[in-house]
Amino acid sequence: MNDSSRKGPLTDIRAIELGQLIAGPYCGQLLADMGADVIKVEPPETGDPMRVWGRGDYPLWWTVCARNKRCVTANLRLEEGQQLVRDLVAKADILIENFRPGTMERWGLGYDVLAKINPGLIMVRVSGYGQTGPYSHRAGYASVGEAMGGMRHLCGEPDRPASRAGLSIGDTLAATFACNGALAALHHREQTGRGQIVDSAIYEAVLNVMEATIPEYTVAGHIRGRSGSKLPHIAPSNIYQCKDGDFLIAANQDTIFRRLAKAMGQPELADDPRYATHVARGDRQDELDALINEWTKTRTIEDVAALMEEHSVPAGQIYRAPEMLEDAHFAARKAIVDVPNERWGSVQMQNVFPKMSETQGEVRWTGPDLGQHNQDVYGNLLGLSEAELSSLEDKGVI
C-alpha cells in the first residue's frame, strides 16, 4: 500500500475525514478516488460503524466507502486526541465532518479554532439540517432528509404509502454536493489564500434535485404525486413485460416514438392523433403503455432489445449485480474493477468516476484495518516517536 502511487487531479490535496457512516465518508471517498490523500480518523477499538454494516454474510460496504484512505485512530473526546486532529489540520487542505452541529465546537475543533491554525483550511460540514436555522440541533439521517426534501413523497405507487429507494440517496447527494463545494472552495483559496466552511445539509441536497416541484406549486398550484414506474404525462417511458422479464423503453420524444412504432411493426401509431404528439401521448399514457405491453410480452428481452437498438430507441434491461458483471459495455469501460484484498483475495467494486482523459484516478486499495496507518501518519507525517505513540495507545487516545 504505497501512498506515493496516488493518481488523479487531486494528488496535491490532503483531507482529514472525521465523519462516520455515509454522508461525510462518501465525500472523503470521492476526494480519495480523485487522488487526494484522505486520512480517516476513527474512534479507537470501535472504529466507524460502517466496518460492520452491509448485506449478505460479510460487511463488504467498508471495502468500498473507505477505499484509498489512510485510517488512523484518535479519541476525540480526549484533549490529546483533539490535539492530534489540530496537528493534522496544520498539514491539511480540507477537513470533513458530519457530526451534529455543535459537536466539533464542544471538542475545541470549531472552525474558529482550526482556521487560526490553518487560515487556508476548508471545513466541510455535512448534517441533516445544516449548521444554522431552528432545526440545526436536531439529529438527522438520510431517511428524514429525503422525506423533508420532498423525495419520499414521490417514491412508490400512488395507491400505497410513500416508499424509498434501496440506497441512502440523501447521504450520497449531500456528500456529492459537499465535495462539489470543497472543490469550489479550493478554487477560491487559489485566488485569495483563504479557506471557508462548506455547509451541506441532507434535506437541502435532496431539495436541489427536486426539479420544478416548487414553482409548479407556487405558480400553478400543482403538487406532484407518486406515479410508480412512470412519470405522469411522459409517454411512453415505462417498464414493460417481456416473456422472460421486465424491460425499460423510453420513447417519449416525437421522433423517437415514430421509430418505436416502426420497430413494433405499427408505424401508423405515430400519425394517429391519439399518440402523434407529446401532449396527446401524455393524456393517453395508460392506454399507450398497455398497447406497448401487449407487444413486448409476446417477445423475449433479447428480441425487444435488438429491435430497439436497430431503430435507435433508448431502452435497457433492469440490471442487478450479475447482469452488470456480465455486460460487455461495463467491461469495456472498466466500470467495475477487481481490487486486491487481504481477506477475500480481491473484491470487485465500482470504479472511480467520472472518467478523466488526463488525470484519471484509480482504486488503489480497499478499506483498511482499524488504525492501520497510525505509525505512518502520526510517526512519519507528524513526527511522533515510538515512545509517544505507545504512550497515546496506553492512554486510549489512539
Image: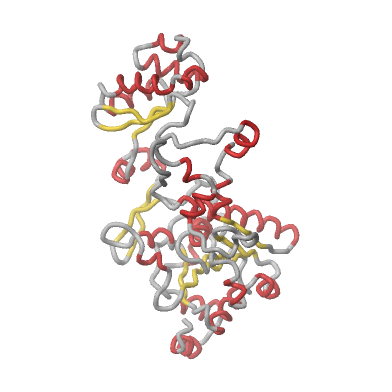
Where residue 37 sits in the image (x, y, percent)?
53, 65
Q: Quadrant of residue 323?
A: top left
In depth, the one of 340 and 67 nearer the eye is 67
Q: What is the x, y in percent for residue 40?
A: 49, 69
Q: How many marks?
A: 0
- Identify whether 219 is placed above or below 334: above
Determine whether, in the image, residue 376 is placed left or right of residue 195. left
Q: Is residue 68 left or right of residue 216?
A: left
The residue shown at (43%, 63%) is: 66
Residue at 50 percent of width and 18 percent of height? 254
Of residue 160 and residue 337, the one placed in the foreground of this image is: 160
Image vertical order of residue 98 relative to residue 259, above or below? below
Please name the residue shown 33% across and 28% down the image.
240
253 vs 71: above or below? above
In the image, residue 23 above or below residue 214: below
Position in image of residue 302 (x %, y %): 28, 28
| Color encoding of the figure | secondary structure
Viewed as shown, does residue 134 lie left or right of 326?
right
- Locate residue 117, reporting x and y percent: 68, 75
**Rendered image quadrant of residue 236:** top left
> Which quadrant of the figure contains the N terminus?
bottom left
